């Protein structure tokens, strides 16, 4: 932008018309400072005259069509001068240029060009122009062809060669002032004093040029601050477009992987469900065979005496086992149907989320496309503004500056407003929202506001027993475990009405601290239940024949010491029993033999409540008053997530029990002491454990929780410490 800028350094495209793509002819200046041939602009105006406006073909800037049409757009005289010189350059390339001399009209070798005569001169006429007094007005307008060929001509030198503009009203007169009222039109003093410009605002061309030059230089200085941003913006948009494409692919791949994983998990659950049904039917068949064999022995001893009795008993046993078999088929059929329904919902959610990723990605791509076009157009306007200002300032031509710089200043102000827009939204356009299929997996499950039934378990309260845990069995019965007194625990089987079907008491050494012993349980198969007592005893209880097999952890783990047992969970498919203690979880087989140990992670001090959750383990910690989902496949139980703790009544709640439903939602009991009484909260979590979905107060001190499929629906069972059994309905909503 120095005043000595050489014309040869100007880019060729600066002189091209953006419509015909040829060298500009009679260049007209648009408000955005781009130039179009007069004839090309006429065509553009005629095409868009009904709309009254058009967009610049280069930068898309809106241009209002003036009432005068093409004549309402200013002619770019500065550009005309540069174009004239470019034509000279082409002609001067020949060393022996022979033409008709503009001075003597003779055919001769040309040596110079006179900008006042608008023609080439022979050597003699060139000398006359430079030496004779009669040609003194032409002296400053002569340019030798040698200087042209050297291509060292500056814009300032070119401006000095061109003649002063003629008066707009009297073309034979040289312009003397500018009419500010008429867009700085060059006029003579006659027009200013007595002509059509009388009374208009007049400006001295030098003063006006100086004022406009300072204004434009300030604009240019401010614009230069944004040059790096303008230059980088197209590349930044391209980079964000690449990020967006990669993010869309990553999100879609993630959804696909989650869908594959969930579908495989449900498929495995369906296989496991079928396997459990097969096992349970085998158990029923074995039970039926055993019962028949027992009756057969009686029949052999007294065939004649009990024939009638045998027939009656056989029929009764067969009917009971048939009902049991049908019950298992119905139960596992319902579980299979729920898994199938869940898979359908997951498939639908996957398709919807995949479509949402495409839609949001497409929306972002549309925004980026718009920004990309605007960035390209902005850079085009910016570069053109700098080139235009540079060429005019470098010419140091007062008339060019007085006429062109006001329009340039207006365009510069508009450009500043535009480049100040940093497109703050660009940062968020390179990604789509974090859609996740592992949340609710296509469904929600609501809990009824009130219990659908409340049962007072027979004899518990009247006998002063305590309930510490609850388990629902696949044969339709329920089991509660807890303390009889400070030296005995009980395992009690009840039916749906809360009537005791069988009970088993175990005697223990009285605790030194005088507290009740804790009893916990978890179903192992159709008739078998794994139990534990706080003092280290574990056992398998048969709910059908009330047999009980027990072991002590001292007999299973050599370095057991004085550890205490806190909770129990079972993996029915793999026939494993999980025993929760301080800092560790011991894994046993269904014969209570040691398999391996899971070390609890830092921050989990004790396993007080546990449930199997797909390939993971849910652990409630009463000491830390927190709950976690942990892995259970390696030697260490690695953290998966911490379940959000309920914030209710400003109290610090601790875990008391946990279970899952057939849709893999997690349910947890939290409790605390309020006004001297235990109060309980029931919470529901999303299938991945990340979201707390429901929090509701429930009655009393709830110690046991489990879900059950019965009568074609799923329910939630809550056992209160003093013997009340609450049943809540679970309603699945897609």
Image: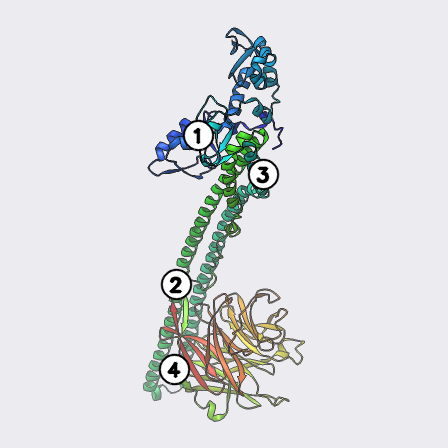
In the rendered view, does 202 fall on the left or right side of 127? left
Q: Earlier in the sequence, mark 4 or mark 2?
A: 2
Q: Earlier in the sequence, mark 4 or mark 1?
A: 1
Q: Residues at badges 2 and 1 in contact (C-beta under 8 Å)?
A: no
Q: Is residue 468 visible?
A: no
Task: State the residue position of label 3.
Answer: 214
In this rendering, which labeled residue sits more in front, label 4 or label 2? 4
Task: State the residue position of label 4.
Answer: 453
Q: CA separation, marks 4 and 1?
A: 108 Å
Residue 5 vs 310, above or below: the answer is above
Q: Earlier in the sequence, mark 2 or mark 3?
A: 3
In this rendering, which labeled residue sits more in front, label 2 or label 1? 1
Task: State the residue position of label 1.
Answer: 194
In this rendering, which labeled residue sits more in front, label 2 or label 3? 3
Q: CA separation, marks 4 and 2?
A: 29 Å
Q: Which mark is residue 133?
A: none
* Secondary structure at numbered mark 3: helix
Residue 251 vs 533, above or below: the answer is above
Q: CA separation, marks 3 and 4?
A: 88 Å
Q: Which mark is residue 340?
A: 2
Who's the residue at 54% across and 22% down the image?
Answer: 162
């Amino acid at each position: 932008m120095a005043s000595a800028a050489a014309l040869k350094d100007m880019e060729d495209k600066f002189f091209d018309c953006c419509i015909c793509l040829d060298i500009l002819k009679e260049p007209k200046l648009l408000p955005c400072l781009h130039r179009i041939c007069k004839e090309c602009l006429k065509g553009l105006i005629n095409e868009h005259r009904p709309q009254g406006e058009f967009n610049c073909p280069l930068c898309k800037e809106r241009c209002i069509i003036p009432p005068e049409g093409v004549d309402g757009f200013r002619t770019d005289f500065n550009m005309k001068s540069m174009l004239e010189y470019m034509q000279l350059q082409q002609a001067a390339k020949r060393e022996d240029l022979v033409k008709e001399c503009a001075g003597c009209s003779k055919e001769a070798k040309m040596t110079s060009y006179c900008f006042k005569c608008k023609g080439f001169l022979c050597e003699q006429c060139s000398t006359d122009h430079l030496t004779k007094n009669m040609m003194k007005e032409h002296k400053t307008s002569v340019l030798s062809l040698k200087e042209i060929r050297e291509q060292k001509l500056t814009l300032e030198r070119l401006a000095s060669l061109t003649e002063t503009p003629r008066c707009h009203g009297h073309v034979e007169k040289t312009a003397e002032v500018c009419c500010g009222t008429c867009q700085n039109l060059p006029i003579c003093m006659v027009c200013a004093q007595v002509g059509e410009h009388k009374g208009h605002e007049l400006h001295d061309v030098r003063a006006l040029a100086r004022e406009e030059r300072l204004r434009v230089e300030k604009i240019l200085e401010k614009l230069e601050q944004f040059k790096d941003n303008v230059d980088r913006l197209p590349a930044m948009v391209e980079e964000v477009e690449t990020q967006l494409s990669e993010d869309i692919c990553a999100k879609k791949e993630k959804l696909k992987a989650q869908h594959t994983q969930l579908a495989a998990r449900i498929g495995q659950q369906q296989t496991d469900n079928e396997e459990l049904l097969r096992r349970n039917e085998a158990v029923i068949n074995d039970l039926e065979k055993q019962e028949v064999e027992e009756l057969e022995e009686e029949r052999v001893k007294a065939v004649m005496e009990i024939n009638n009795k045998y027939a009656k008993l056989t029929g009764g046993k067969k009917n009971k086992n048939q009902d049991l078999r049908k019950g298992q088929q119905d139960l596992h059929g319902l579980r299979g149907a729920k898994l199938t329904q869940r898979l359908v919902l997951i498939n639908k959610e996957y398709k919807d989320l995949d479509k949402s990723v495409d839609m949001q990605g497409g929306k972002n791509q549309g925004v980026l496309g718009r920004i990309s076009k605007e960035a390209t157009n902005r850079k085009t306007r910016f570069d053109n503004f700098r080139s235009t200002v540079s060429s005019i300032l470098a010419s140091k031509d007062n008339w060019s500056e007085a006429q062109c710089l006001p329009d340039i200043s207006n365009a510069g102000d508009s450009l500043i407003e535009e480049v100040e827009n940093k497109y703050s939204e660009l940062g968020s356009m390179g990604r789509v929202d974090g859609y996740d299929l592992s949340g609710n997996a296509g469904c929600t499950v609501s809990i009824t506001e009130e219990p659908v039934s409340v049962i007072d378990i027979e004899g518990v309260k009247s006998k002063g027993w305590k309930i510490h845990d609850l388990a629902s069995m696949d044969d339709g019965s329920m089991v509660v475990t807890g303390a009889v007194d400070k030296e005995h625990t009980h395992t009690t089987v009840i039916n749906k009405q809360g009537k005791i079907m069988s009970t088993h008491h175990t005697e223990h050494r009285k605790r030194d601290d005088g507290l009740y012993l804790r009893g916990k349980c978890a179903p192992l198969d159709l008739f078998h239940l794994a139990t534990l007592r706080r003092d280290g005893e574990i056992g398998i209880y048969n709910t059908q024949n009330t047999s009980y097999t027990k072991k002590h952890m001292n007999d299973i783990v050599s370095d057991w010491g004085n550890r205490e047992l806190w909770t129990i969970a079972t993996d029915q498919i793999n026939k494993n029993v999980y025993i929760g203690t301080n800092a560790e979880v011991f894994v046993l087989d269904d014969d209570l033999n040691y398999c391996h140990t899971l070390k609890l992670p830092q921050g989990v001090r004790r396993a007080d409540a546990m449930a199997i959750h797909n390939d993971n383990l849910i652990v409630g910690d009463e000491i830390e008053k927190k709950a976690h989902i942990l892995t259970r496949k390696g030697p260490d139980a690695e953290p998966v997530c911490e379940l959000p703790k309920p914030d209710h009544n400003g109290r610090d709640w601790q875990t008391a029990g946990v279970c899952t439903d057939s849709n893999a939602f997690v349910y947890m009991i939290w409790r605390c002491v309020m006004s001297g009484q235990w109060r309980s909260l029931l919470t529901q979590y999303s299938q991945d454990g990340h979201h707390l979905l429901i929090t509701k107060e429930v009655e009393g001190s709830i110690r046991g929780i489990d879900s059950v499929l019965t009568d074609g629906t799923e329910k939630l069972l809550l056992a209160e410490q003093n013997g009340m059994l609450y049943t809540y309905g679970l309603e699945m909503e897609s």
